[in-house]
Image (cartoon, grey):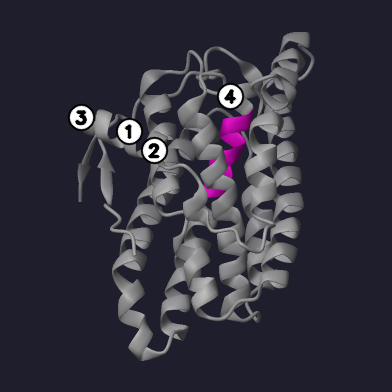
Amino acid sequence: MTELVVRRLLIDLEAPLARHWNGGDAFRTAFFNALSMSFPSGEQFFIDSVRAGIRALPADRRAAFEAEAKGFIGQEATHRRIHALFNNHLARQGLINHWEPRALARIRQLDSAEVRTHLAVTAATEHFTAILAEYLLTSDTPLRGAEQRLATMWRWHASEESEHRSTAFDLYRALDGNEYWRARVFKAVTWIFITDALRQTLHNLWRDGSWWRPSTWVSGVRLLFGRDGLVRRLRGPWKAYLREDFHPSQQDDRPALDWLRDNTQVWRPV
């Protein structure tokens, strides 16, 4: 099991955000704002899923997971709080979070599902966040020119997502979750995640008034489909999840470990 440190992020999230805080780029700002809008409800669902997974384990197997689950819950609760503060600034800018109500409605639909389904959804989404995290930590493209405190926030979050990428996955397997269902849920989560992210990004651009600027769409094509864009960089790691022999630990966690080691001045353990 992995020892997970819960960290307090030492940045100022009281100061207002620039409208285009991500290097003055409207599309990149709108995209990351959209991701942040999904996090508070998503993180709570992940917390609840892991808690339920621990309770569902036989008592004699629970102890092996409890310490890691506690760290996972602490990290996700901290992410939820930080992004709620960030999202409050977005609301004051006039952006409307349509993603969260859709996410909460889907979560309510899962109320009657068994815990393995909750963990399969959590593990699938955690894989998305882990491969996105590696992209943020190894490429200058997505956060080029971003306000320093916000670039720090995103890379801190990315590093912790890489750290706890195996927790829900291991619980799913410990509860005898099968590979067919894991892959099927992942494909469904992929469709939902991508469509929700794009819908919210487009709505953010509309509210922001950047919809009609050609530079907005040039940036969007570069971020999504460019040589160092999301699609090219994430295609391989995305497909890896569908292998029967896949495990999240196969992903390289050195970028996350290096960032946490080299940036101890911006966090402290709780």
At a point 34% along the width and 89% down the height, the residue shown is 60
How far apart are the alpha carbons under marks 4 and 1? 26 Å
Q: Which of the labelled discs sits on residue 265, or is there none?
A: 3
Real-space CA distance between mark 3 and mark 4, rounded to the nearest whole angstrom: 26 Å
Disc nearer the start of the sequence (3/4): 4
In the figure, residue 101 lies in which quadrant? bottom right
**Neighbourhood count class around disc 4 (C-alpha, 10 Å): few under 14, some 14–19, many 20 upward:** many
Q: Local crowd at mark 3 within 10 Å, few (<14), some, or many (≥20)?
A: few
Image check: 34 left or right of 260?
Answer: right
The magenta segment: 31-39
Measure how far apart labels 2 and 4 are at the Cα level. 27 Å
> Residue 155 or 244: which is nearer the viewer?
244
- Please give the residue where the numbered disc 1 appears in the rendered image: 258
Q: Are marks 3 and 4 in contact (CB under 8 Å)?
A: no
Q: Amino acid at mark 3?
A: Gln
Q: Nearer the viewer, mark 2 or mark 3?
A: 2
User: Mark 4 = which residue?
Assistant: 29
As drawn, the label of residue 254 is: 2
> What is the distance, in whole Å, between disc 2 and disc 1 at their CAs?
6 Å
> Decide: marks 2, 1 in contact (CB < 8 A)?
yes
